[in-house]
Image: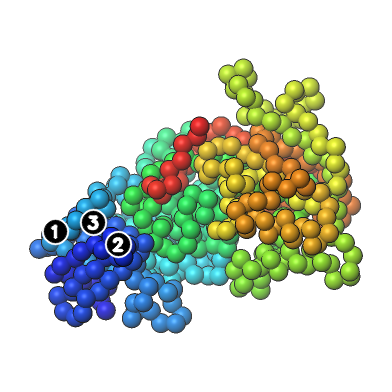
Amino acid sequence: MSPLEVAATVSVDEAARTLRWSPSTGHERQVELTDLVGVVRSPTSSTSEYRVLYIDRNSANNSPNETPSSLCQIDIASIPEGLSSHLQEIPRHLRRDKPIQVIISTRSGTGSAKQVFRDNVEPFLRYLGLNYEAIETQSSQTILELARSRFLEDACAGVPRTIILLSGDGGLVDLIDVFSKSQRAIRAMPDIALVPCGTGNAMASSIGLRSGPAGALRALLYGRPTSVPTIAVNFSPGAQLVIDEGRQRAPISESPELGSDQTMYGAVVASWGLHAALVADSDTTEYRKFGTERFKMAAKELLYPSDGSMPHRFRGRITLTSPDLDPSANPSTSERKGPRTTDPHQHTLPETEHMYVLTTLVPRLEKDFLISPASKALDGRMRFLRFGPLSGDEAMRLTMLAYQGGAHVADDLVTYEEVDRVRIDFDEDLERWRRVCIDGKIVIVEQGGWMEIRMVTRRVLNLIKPADAVEVRE
Ligand SMILES: Nc1ncnc2c1ncn2[C@@H]1O[C@H](COP(=O)(O)OP(=O)(O)OP(=O)(O)O)[C@@H](O)[C@H]1O
C-alpha cells in the first residue's frame, strides 16, 4: 500500500477502537486508534481538506531489516464523527522561522535512529509541510558541538528553536550540560522533542513516551513545552570523566567560559554502587547490541562474581539534605554550595557500607523499571534511594520488585525519601568501586574524593511533554 492515499470514506469504530476507510482503489483498511498519530488541516492546496496521520505496522514498504512500522497519511474531504476531537492546529513549536533541527544519534541504543527517522519522523515533517534540517551524529561530540556552536547562540539571541532528538537520554543531557554551563542569559529556551531511540530512555519513558514512534509523534503535535528541572553534580578536584568504553579519561568539564570546572549537569539520575557499575560495565559496543538486556547481563556479573565471592560492599559516607518545607524561610536553599554542618535539614546516614545508592528526578529508568514511583517527571523534586550490602539473590529480588510497579520502595531494606542535596564521601581503595553515573556518563572519583548532587533553580530548556501526561505539581 502506498503511504500517500486519498480516502473516499473514513469512519471511527469506537467499540473496536479502530479507524476504517475505503481507499479510492483497493479494499477497506483499518488501523487501531492507538496507532493514530493525529489529524491536521491539509497543508497543501488540494481537494482534500484534512490529513490523517497513522502508524502502519504492516507496511509493505518494510523489509525485515527495517523498523516494524512507518508513518502513513490519508487525505480526506471531511472529518467523521469520532475524529473531530483529534483535529489539531500545527502548534507554535512546529512553526518556526528557522528550520526544525533533527538530530539523529546513530549510536544510541541498538542503532535504530536512522530508520526511525526515515520511516517515521521524516514523513511526519514532510506530511505537515514543515521545514527541517537533519543531522546525523558523527561522534560522541557532535551534539555537544552543535549545542555550543548553534543552539546556545540562538537561545542567547532570543531565537526560538525546536530540536527533535532521536536518541536516548544522552542527547538531552548533552544539551542541558552545555546550556547550564553557560553564564550567558538564555532569552529563548529551545523546545526539545524526544523520539526515544536509546537503551533506557529514562526521560522519555518518564514523561509518558512508552514505546514506538506513535507516542513521540503525537507528542510533537499535541504536546506542550515544559521546562526541565536540572541537577548540578560537583566533584572533588581529582575526579575524571570516563570515555571511549572505559579506556580513556577526560576532564569533567572544559567550558569555553569557565575553563576547567568540576561540575556536571543532568536531568535524570546520579548514582553510585550497583547501578553506576552496571551502566559503566555495559557501555561497550559489544554489550550495546543487547538493548536493555545489557544492564541485566552486567548486573549478573556484579551480583554473582565469578570467583564465588559475595557482591561488593561499597564503602562511603552519605549525607542527605531534605528540602526546605517552607522555601520562603530560606530562598537560597537550592543554590547553596559546599558542605554544611549545622543545617537542621541535614543528616549523615549511620550506614557506611552500601550496595545501591541513587538519586533521581524521574520515576522510570526504563519503560518498565519504576525506580521512583513517587516521582513525577519534570516536577523538580529529587528522590534518594538506597539499600545496603545484600546477597545476589536478595538484591535481585529487590530489583525485580522495581519492575513490578515500583514495589521495592515499600521494602524495609530500602531507604526512599525526597532530598534537596546528597553528598557522598568515598572510602574505597579500588578505582572500580569509585565509579559514579550521571545520566549515563561515568565519572571516577579519586581516592578520598567526594561528590555532591544538588537541585538547581535555573531552567535552560523545554521538553515537549505528551498532552495526555501533563502533571501538575501539588
Ligand atoms: N556516531 C557516533 N560515534 C560515537 N559515539 C556516538 C555517535 N553517535 C552517538 N554517540 C554517543 O553514543 C551515546 C548514545 O547515548 P544515548 O543516551 O543517546 O543512548 P543510550 O545510552 O543507548 O540510551 P539511554 O541513555 O537512554 O540508556 C552518547 O554518548 C553519544 O554521544
Q: Is residue 305 above or below residue 66?
A: above
Residue drawn at point x = 53 percent, y = 50 percent: 206
Image quadrant of residue 279?
bottom right
* SS class, disc 2: loop
What amino acid type should be assigned to the residue bearing mark 3? Leu
Q: How packed is label 3: few (under 14 Cα within 10 Å), some, or many (20 or more)? A: some
Residue drawn at point x = 81 percent, y = 62 percent: 392
Say whether disc 1 or disc 2 marks the residue closer to the N-terminus. 2
* SS class, disc 3: loop
Residue 253 locus on image (x, y percent): 65, 46
* Distance of label 3 from label 1 (alpha carbons): 10 Å
Say whether disc 3 or disc 2 marks the residue closer to the N-terminus. 2
* Badge nearest the viewer, 1 or 2: 2
Q: Quadrant of the N terminus?
A: bottom left
Relative to 101, is 301 on the left or the right?
right
Query: What mark, if any, has residue 83 been given in the picture?
Result: 3
* Badge nearest the viewer, 3 or 1: 3
